[in-house]
Image: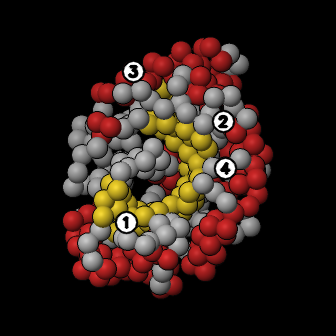
């Protein structure tokens, strides 16, 4: 399967400290000099596009903390052949940036929001403001993006009681609300060993509240999600079943972290690093050939054979 999707992490820094992510008080931030600069990110992205990538999603950490993010968005959007530029964010800084991001060329936005209850928000994120995140979500809906998705990681006995309320958002707003099975990826998240609430349980909770869901064909931007909606709803509901289903065979993405390490699979170790090549002045042809070799090794990895339980999402992105 052709690799056409790059998830590009901009920074390991985040303004939240979520219970399933790397505890920053333990790990510390990467040194500034280790992070790729705007020009390096743009050169790497251009080489990925030359190698076949059509879609780039900016991740983090929290990507909106990247200095001069609008300048970087414009640089990436100008890459010939890039068809789509998207962003995953916690939404806290989005209120004031939604319109400028859209004007700079951002096509789509995913917002990670796991509760609508202030006390639970503090429990999950450790900091931040639910009001700011909600304002960011509403600002993104007004900004004119081609699609806005809301990512809701369901965690038993933490936020599963809110499933019907989140499903309701897809009826009242033109949102794609995606219910994601909890998947422990590092030592901290492994402490939540009883948090799994399966897609089957989530769907039942929604249908008990609102009646049967109607499955609709998945579109090119739905990724591994199975998509449903209620009649008359303004938006859609998606289910991403990383624990109870297997979709690795359909994966067309690779990841590059904020230091230039490339991961063919979320559960693989990094196989190559581009930073040294970029800083040594490698030309685009050299970078393209290296990236094509990375694509060839992707098929070796799957979620059962690699490094599950040891992924630092703060620097690599989801």
Mark 1 or mark 4, which is nearer to you?
A: 1
Q: Relative to residue 276, is residue 56 depicted above or below?
A: below
Where does the image place residue 288, in percent across and percent down from the top left? 57, 19
Asked if the residue under mark 1 is in contact with the one under mark 2, i.e. CB atoms within 8 Å, the reply is no
* Mark earlier in primary sequence (4, 3): 4
| Of residues 176 and 280, the one drawn nearer to the viewer in this rendering | 176
Residue under label 4: 106
* Alpha-carbon span between mark 1 and mark 4: 26 Å
Residue shown at 71% from the left, 47% from the top: 105
* Alpha-carbon span between mark 3 and mark 2: 22 Å
Q: Is residue 38 left or right of residue 172?
A: right
Q: Secondary structure at mark 2?
A: helix
Residue under label 3: 296
Q: Is residue 251 left or right of residue 254?
A: left
* Mark earlier in primary sequence (3, 2): 2
* Mark earlier in primary sequence (3, 1): 1
* Alpha-carbon span between mark 4 and mark 3: 29 Å
Mark 2 Cα-neighbour bin, 10 Å: few <14, some 14–19, many ≥20? many
Q: Secondary structure at mark 4?
A: loop
Residue shown at 44% from the left, 81% from the top: 120
Q: Relative to residue 261, is residue 181 depicted above or below?
A: below
Q: Which mark is residue 41?
A: 2
* Alpha-carbon span between mark 4 and mark 2: 16 Å
Where does the image place residue 250, in percent across and percent down from the top left? 32, 37
């Amino acid at each position: 399967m052709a690799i056409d999707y790059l998830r590009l992490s901009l920074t390991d820094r985040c303004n939240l400290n979520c219970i399933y992510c790397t505890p920053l008080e333990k790990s510390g931030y990467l040194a500034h000099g280790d992070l790729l600069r705007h020009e390096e990110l743009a050169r790497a992205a251009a080489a990925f596009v030359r190698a076949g990538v059509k879609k780039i999603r900016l991740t983090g950490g929290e990507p909106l903390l990247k200095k001069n993010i609008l300048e970087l968005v414009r640089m990436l959007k100008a890459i010939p052949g890039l068809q789509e530029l998207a962003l995953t964010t916690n939404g806290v800084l989005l209120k004031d940036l939604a319109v400028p991001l859209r004007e700079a060329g951002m096509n789509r936005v995913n917002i990670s929001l796991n509760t609508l209850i202030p006390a639970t928000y503090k429990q999950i994120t450790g900091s931040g403001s639910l009001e700011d995140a909600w304002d960011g979500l509403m600002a993104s809906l007004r900004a004119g993006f081609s699609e806005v998705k809301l990512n809701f990681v369901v965690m038993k006995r933490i936020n599963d009681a809110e499933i019907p309320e989140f499903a309701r958002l897809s009826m009242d707003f033109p949102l794609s609300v995606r219910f994601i099975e909890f998947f422990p990826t590092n030592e901290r998240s492994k402490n939540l060993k009883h948090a799994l609430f399966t897609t089957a349980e989530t769907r039942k909770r929604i249908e008990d509240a609102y009646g049967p869901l109607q499955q609709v064909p998945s579109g090119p931007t739905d990724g591994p999600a199975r998509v449903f909606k209620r009649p008359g709803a303004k938006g859609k509901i998606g289910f991403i079943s990383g624990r109870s289903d297997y979709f690795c065979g359909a994966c067309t993405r690779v990841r590059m972290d904020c230091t230039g390490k490339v991961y063919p699979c979320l559960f693989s170790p990094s196989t190559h690093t581009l930073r040294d090549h970029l800083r040594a002045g490698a030309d685009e042809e050299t970078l393209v050939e290296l990236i094509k070799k990375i694509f060839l090794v992707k098929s070796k990895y799957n979620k059962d054979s690699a490094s599950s339980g040891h992924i630092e999402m703060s620097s690599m992105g989801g």
